[in-house]
Image: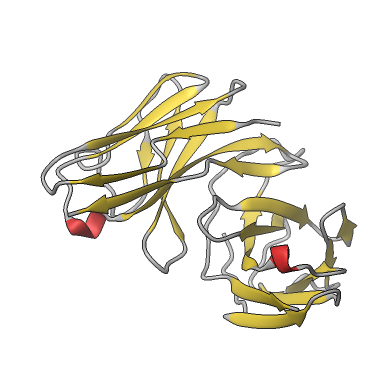
Amino acid sequence: SAVISQKPSRDICQRGTSLTIQCQVDSQVTMMFWYRQQPGQSLTLIATANQGSEATYESGFVIDKFPISRPNLTFSTLTVSNMSPEDSSIYLCSVPRGLEYGYTFGSGTRLTVV
Amino acid sequence: DAKTTQPPSMDCAEGRAANLPCNHSTISGNEYVYWYRQIHSQGPQYIIHGLKNNETNEMASLIITEDRKSSTLILPHATLRDTAVYYCIVRVDNAGGTSYGKLTFGQGTILTVHP
């Protein structure tokens, strides 16, 4: 089963700046998913990241705001660009664990924009 | 993927069985039912999934109705640590279950286990 290390666990950032969130997986995975969880809300998928190709973004999310890198099969980054207070959320990455075990999620990055 | 409907909140006494319902009346024949939970300030945790038959693992049991339009997650002996938001999700897996598509989360059920 896959184990995910997500960094940073939390950060407080100034508006207008950018933050890059890292996800490191202990095994090779084809697909990685990035989610956002706004305060008191459920999870919303931002994009799907495949190694060697551009990420696929969900409706309402654009590459300029949330650029994603996927340089190899064990690592991915999500950048939250030009942040505003509305970007204050928990950001999570997720990978498939195999048919019998569903998906594993990282512990999340709690972002506060001031 | 089909939409799911869950009650917003439920209570359960510690040691009792917690039965969490989920409606998925528009589920397709090739869609699986997945259950996840999210304990406060943590990432979601996989619990169980199934297609047609009832399933059981070390965490829970999943009962799917014969018409597959609804299901129930059963935590047989709830503990205080089971207090969490429980999400019921339906999604497609391809033949053999090798497709790892996206999960679409609804609002879930807040389960509170009290002493």
- Which of the 4 image quadrants contains residue A77? top left
- Front position in the image: B103 or B13: B13
Residue B25 seen anywhere in this rendered image of the structure: no
Which quadrant of the rendered structure holds the C terminus of chain B? bottom right
Which of the pair B83/B85 is nearer the observer?
Answer: B83
In the rendered structure, the answer to whether residue B110 lies left or right of residue A56 reads right
Q: Which residue is drawn at 37% across and 33% down?
A: A55
| Residue lying at the far front of the rendered structure | B115
Residue A107 picture location, percent across and down: 52, 44
Q: In which quarter of the image is residue A34?
A: top left
- Quarter of the image that includes the N terminus of chain B: bottom right
Nearer to me, A84 or B3: A84
Quadrant assignment, res A97: top right
Residue A39 in the image: state x and y as whole percent.
37, 65
Q: Where is residue B18 in the image (x, y as percent from the top left)?
A: 79, 75
Residue B19 shows in the view: yes
Position of A18 with respect to B16 (left or right) is left
